[in-house]
Image (spheres, grey):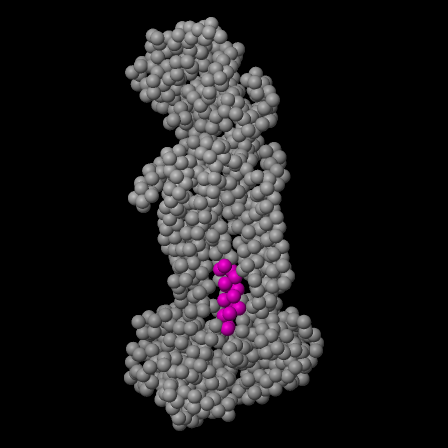
Amino acid sequence: MTVARGQFVAVYGPSGSGKTTLLDLIVGLRSTPDSGSIRVDGREVAGMSNKEADEYRLHKLGIIGESGVLQQGATAVRAAAIRVAMDDARRAEKRVAPLLVSLGLGGRLKHRVEQLSMGERQRVVIALALSTDPQLVLADEPTGRLDSENTRLVLTLLRELCRERGVALLLATHDREVAAFADEVLELHDGKLRPYAADPRPALVDGIREGKAAS
Amino acid sequence: MSLKSTRFLYGAHIKARSVLVQLAFAIFGVAVGVALLFGSQISSTSLTHSAAELSTTQLVGTSQVQLDARGPEGFSEHVLEEVRRQPGVQSTFPVLERQVNVIGSSGERSVDLIGVEPTALRATIPLLRQFSANLLRHAHGIALPEPLSNEINAGAIVRLQIGARFVNTLVGTTLTPADIGRLVHSPVAVTSIDYAQKVANAQGRLNRIFVRYRPADAAATRSALARLAARSNINLNPAGFDAQVFGVAVSPESESELLFSSIAALVGFMFALNAMLITIPARRKLIEDLREQGATRKRTVQVLLFDASVIGVLACVLGLAVGDALSILVFRTQPGYLSFAFPVGNARVVTWQSVALAVVVGMLASVFGVLWPVRHILARRLRTAQRLTLTHGTQIALLILGVVCLAITTAVLLADTGAAVFGNATLIVALACLLPLLYRLLLRLLAPAVMRVGGVAAEMAVDELRAPQTRVRSLAVALLGAVAVFGVVEFHGVATNLQRGLDASARDLDSSADIWITPRGSSSLLGTITFAPFDSERLARIPGVSRVGTYRGSFLDWGARRLWIVAPASNSRSVVPSSQLLDSNATFASARVRAGGWAVLSQALVSEYQLHIGQSFTLPSPHPLALRLAGVTTNLGWPPGAVILNSAEYARGWEGSNPTAYELQTQSGIPVSAVRDRVGGALRSQPGLVAETSLQRQRRHYALAAQGLQRLTQIRWLILASAILAIVAAMGSLVWQRRDRIAADRSNGITRMVLWRALVWESALLLGAGSLIGAVWGLYAQLLGSHFLSTVTGFPVVYSIEGDAAVSGFALVNVVAVAILASWGWIAVRVRARSVSPAY
């Protein structure tokens, strides 16, 4: 599998198919894959030292998890700026603010995380992931707790931002509608990746067309 | 819901490792509080029980009354014959007692030498029921308690110092706990009355006669004995009178220990409660899980109470064990000066009341802490968002309550310091109510500077402390730090104020002479051990000596008080310690006492007998003295109180005019130490006497006072140790709850060093803010405790705000706790970066 910069790839598969294992291998949380290798920006992931792994996760990767990872008590801009602050504490918030504005949170920068809605928090999580200009962003069910409207909003923003910034996005999901947002869908079956045979995107597009026709 | 169902639900809940860990922290935190409370209670009850053992259970036996000498020289044996002739008297048990020094090969101890009639041994005196009557009847020797014998390495022969004389004596036997029970820890030596009279040079003298009479003749016998006592100038008291007198003697110390053990108990309760509050998130989750699964409110409370019971029982068991161990390790001292007048030991006494109190407090804290979040959660609908901050109304209510409690404390301080325990309780309540506001203000004040200095790690810490989700836990830890430092600062300050007061009293009393000649040994420090007089003219001729005065002193029972009689020579530099006078004129008092016919009394006596300056009273000395009140003092460090009169007056009132010390004034311009050395040379023929300078004597007094205050110091260290343990448990719990977030931060590339520094900053800010508030509160509490000691117990106290105590208490708690937490945090941040999936 190759994910190019600016490309959005979804890994689709039911629970227990190995989606999280795949992402953990890419993050470097597990030692080595059973076979094959994982390279990010030409660098082998397995076998990194602790210091190299920290550096890799900070500058090469971004992870979109649940909103609980955000620093409690912090403002939206500060919560999103924590990764940047590792290198440049003085200008971290200034650097991250435009990203938050592009995510539609311009009027919420100084609100505390606990004052934001679920959808807004998830957008802060996206900003956090993108804040250090990573080359690859990983997301595991990033919209699992959102309603359909917020899901559509978050995924659309995510796709546009990754394209604009040339960031590769790899998203794991068991939801076909979420997978439909990707440029390419791969299926994980019995530990093996293959192009998704029943590509959900045409059905979804048809569904949208039908919906539009009905309205 | 049945107990089985409750257990099932609870068992399912605690299967999760995170819940088990939280449970462990809660148990540990509550146990620390229980240990502190239990340990301090043992300290305060052991003292009062120890001397009661001697008289009431051992010497007294079945006697109903005792005839008791008023002075240390005792009374004639002829009185015994008269007592035996009284109608209704069935048996009599005469006793001779003397304060002596027992000197072994590796130490010496001041003991109460008790001489009893061998024929009475097998009768009704439990003390010697198992003792060999033959041994005592025929052997000229003494029996020593085993611990004492081991302590001084007694061997077969010991030296007895009586006054200034030495006598070698056989140790006939050592007494074990099987012989005399807990009395084995008391400083006594037992012998036959004949031998005691011989070694004490008190042939034909007795100190007491215990009397058993026929109950049917009680009235007539008592009346006859009362008449006999009156004409012989001796006291007729109940047989168990010593316990009563001792009770009065330790009353001030008991009251002060009650105050301080109560404070320790309050502090212990707060520690226990905070441990529960910190684990609230786990309990909230339990409640919500139960309700989501369909449990009714009643069933939810049942499960929670089961949770409280598990925590409470396990914590109490652990706490009692730790508290018991601490009391053995920490509270091992003798009560110092009290042993000069009472044969009181250092037995450790554990009462069921101490155990019950500790258990009740531990369970209360567990139940209250468990049910704390329940009211709000059960009151609202299941999915309603939980309010994480206090409502405006609640904040106002807390502010008002805090201010009211502060006002009550101030009222207690100004109007009625006898209610110091209550005052401390309201002060702690005020602390708890006002802490949230003060903590928020402090954080707002400190945050900018901290963030500037600490960078991103400090920012993370400050954000964490501001988060509403962690507000209750943060406040609980801050309160823990505040209460801990409050306790430490109060105890340190009060102990220091009391020490200074006692030192001032000692300094004033001892500086009435430049050189003191007294019998060797610690028991002569209060000037109550007589010795055979020698030519004071010879002393006056020693180069450098300008004046010699005869000092006399003893103990005298007046009512239920065993008073310290202080009788300096009229020509002493000072006869009345001016620093100890209360509302009295020092010049007037001194002049009157020098002239004779006047005396100075302690405040407690003046209050008890409702005297005023100039009023006449009769001192119940062996030859009663009619005196007038010249001044009022503190208790000079002797809890029951003291009487100061001049030495010549004393000689009139007591049989025998033997000195208990010589006071020497030196000529100016000549080093006192040089004169002391010359005096020491002149005493070579009297090896039982020692010459020391006023400064040397003061230092011995200071050491004695410090020993008397040791329990206070020990309770302070106990609180400090408990505080650090409680804080470590609380912060450990917080850090444990943070592990998931730490793992997530690691996944985001936040380095271990940054995360560790954030934890350290958070601990330092939390504890620092809480400790600072607690230190201020502790300084206020010092005033409360010091005033209590002064007005209620009569101890001399120097009022001052001990800022050192605040600084050292603050520094100790923070430095040690943060250091331990830094180590713990270093381990915590080594957690692996978290899986991308929140499910893992």
Residue B249 colored in magenta in the image = yes
* Residue B67 showing in the rendered view: yes
Q: In front: B395, or B804?
A: B395
Residue drawn 55% across the image and 52% down it: B428
Is residue B817 depicted above or below B489 in this figure?
Answer: above
Dominant secondary structure of the residues highlighted in magenta in the image: helix
- B584 lies left or right of B385: right
**Count of number-bearing discs:** 0
Q: Where does the image place residue B144, in percent across and percent down from the top left?
A: 36, 75
Is residue B442 depicted above or below B180 in this figure?
Answer: above
Q: Where does the image place residue A69, in percent across and percent down from the top left?
A: 47, 27
Q: In front: B691, or B255?
A: B255
Quarter that holds the N terminus of chain B: top left
Range covered by the magenta-colored residues: B248-262
Q: Where does the image place residue B222, in percent across and percent down from the top left?
A: 44, 88
Residue drawn 45% across the image and 69% down it: B48
Q: Where does the image place residue B585, in percent across and percent down from the top left?
A: 70, 74
Is residue B48 depicted above or below B409 in this figure?
Answer: below
> To which quarter of the image does residue B498 belong?
bottom right
Q: In front: B67, or B223?
A: B223
Residue B35 colored in magenta in the image = no
* Residue B826 showing in the rendered view: no
Residue drawn 40% across the image and 6% down it: A202
- B166 lies left or right of B546: left
Residue drawn 33% across the image and 78% down it: B126
> To which quarter of the image does residue A183 belong?
top left
> To which quarter of the image does residue B572 belong?
bottom right
Quarter that holds the C terminus of chain B: top left
Is residue B561 depicted above or below B324 in this figure?
Answer: below
